[in-house]
Image: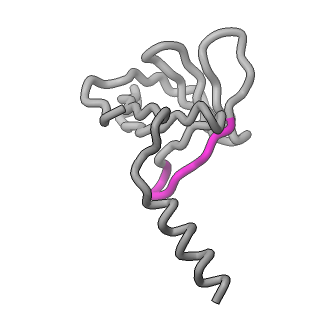
């Protein structure tokens, strides 16, 4: 019974409305893809909608701008521009679009 209650709590939390302090942004990339990113400053991570799921990318230290990476996928940027890094591939340039979801 405890396990069922725990699963219900996790499911409710996962579907909850965005919390205060989260920054939602949509980026259009040079390769044609669109990235939806939720920056969560209080947890020092970014959530990236990815291949039908969600990746949580821990924040990385930078001299300026921002960087998030899980070692395989990364976001690195400054202002309204970022680069999507996937493994050893050439980074993909992306820019924030005007129809960004509510912040």
Task: Pick whichever, 91 or 53, lies toward us.
Answer: 53
- 61 in relation to 37, above or below: above
Q: Position of residue 57 (x, y in %)?
A: 64, 40
Residue 67 shown in magenta: no
Report the predominant secondary structure element of the magenta stretch: strand
- 83 in relation to 24, above or below: above
Residue 52 shown in magenta: yes
Query: What residue is drawn where x is 57% and y is 26%?
Result: 91
- Counting labels gives 0
**Residue 15 lies in what quarter of the image?**
bottom left
Lateral position of residue 34 relative to residue 13, left or right? left
The quarter in which the C terminus is drawn is top left
The magenta stretch spans which residues? 50-58
Residue lying at the far bottom in this picture: please name it: 1
Q: Position of residue 95 (x, y in %)?
A: 39, 21
Query: What residue is drawn where x is 58% and y is 76%?
Result: 7
Task: Pick whichever, 41 or 51, lies toward us.
Answer: 41
The quarter in which the N terminus is drawn is bottom right
């Amino acid at each position: 019974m405890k396990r069922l209650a725990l699963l219900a709590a996790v499911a409710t939390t996962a579907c909850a409305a965005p919390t205060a302090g989260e920054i939602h942004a949509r980026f259009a990339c040079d390769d044609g893809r669109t990235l939806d990113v939720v920056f969560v400053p209080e947890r020092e991570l970014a959530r990236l909608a990815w291949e039908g799921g969600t990746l949580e990318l821990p924040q990385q230290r930078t001299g300026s701008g921002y960087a998030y990476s899980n070692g395989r996928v990364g976001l690195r940027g400054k202002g309204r521009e970022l680069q999507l890094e996937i493994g050893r591939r050439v980074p993909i340039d992306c820019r924030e679009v005007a129809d960004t979801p509510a912040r």
